Image: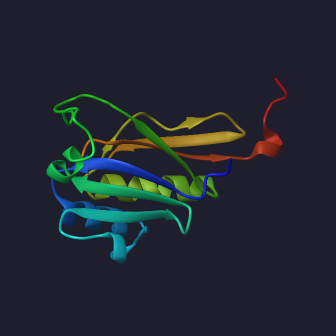
Amino acid sequence: MKINQIYVNLPVKDVQKTKEFWTQLGFSINEQMSNEKSVCVVMKEDQIYVMFLTEESFQTFSERPVPKGDTTQVLVAISLDSRAEVDQVVNTALENGATQHEEPQDYGWMYHNSFWDINGHGWNVMFADRSQMPAE
C-alpha cells in the first residue's frame, strides 16, 4: 500500500486569521480547497496538507466534541531543511501570536523547536542530519 497524500484536519475559531498566520510563516494556500469555513495550508505540494476548519465544519466529521481549553489532542511534527529554517518558522510564529511550546532542543544530529499556534495546536519543527545520527 502506498499513501499518495496526507490531509490533517484541525478545528479553528477564525479561518481568516489562521490563513494569515500560516502565510506569514511562508506556507502557501490551496485556494481551490479553501472557503469561508476552511483553509487548506500546503505543507508539501501534492503530498501533505493541513485543513483548518471552523469548529462547526470540523464537527461534521466527528460526533466527538471539539476540545476546549488547555487540552492537547495531537502534536504535529514537521521537518525542514536546516536549523535556520526551524528557527525562522518558530520565531515568525511567535512574532505573529503563537506561544513557545518548549525551549529548543539540540541533540547534535537533530534540532527541534516548537510552538502552540494561534488556535492552540502544537507544532514541533525539526531538522535532522541522519548521516550524523548515533548508531545506538
* Residue 123 appears in view: yes
Residue 128 placement, left or right of 11: right
* Residue 118 appears in view: no
Q: Name which residue lies at 57% across and 57% down.
A: 84
Q: Using the image as rendered, state which of residue 131 and residue 77 is in the foreground.
A: 77
Q: Farthest top residue?
A: 136
Q: Is residue 22 above or below residue 83?
A: below
Q: Is residue 62 above or below residue 31?
A: above
Q: Using the image as rendered, state which of residue 86 and residue 45 is in the foreground.
A: 45
Q: Quadrant of residue 14?
A: bottom left
Q: Where does residue 93 sit, x and y in percent of width and height?
A: 35, 55
Q: Where does residue 51 sit, x and y in percent of width and height?
A: 35, 57
Residue 111 placement, left or right of 118: right
Q: Using the image as rendered, state which of residue 96 and residue 120 is in the foreground.
A: 120
Q: Is residue 110 above or below residue 20?
A: above
Residue 102 placement, left or right of 54: right
Residue 119 placement, left or right of 107: left
Q: Where does residue 66 sit, x and y in percent of width and height?
A: 20, 37
* Total marks placed: 0
Q: How is the image coloured?
A: rainbow
Point out the image quarter for the C terminus: top right
Q: Name which residue lies at 85% across and 28% down.
A: 135
Q: Where does residue 21 sit, x and y in percent of width and height?
A: 29, 62
Q: Farthest bottom residue?
A: 32
Q: Quadrant of residue 63?
A: top left
Q: Is residue 110 above or below residue 52?
A: above
Q: Name which residue lies at 56% across and 62% down.
A: 47
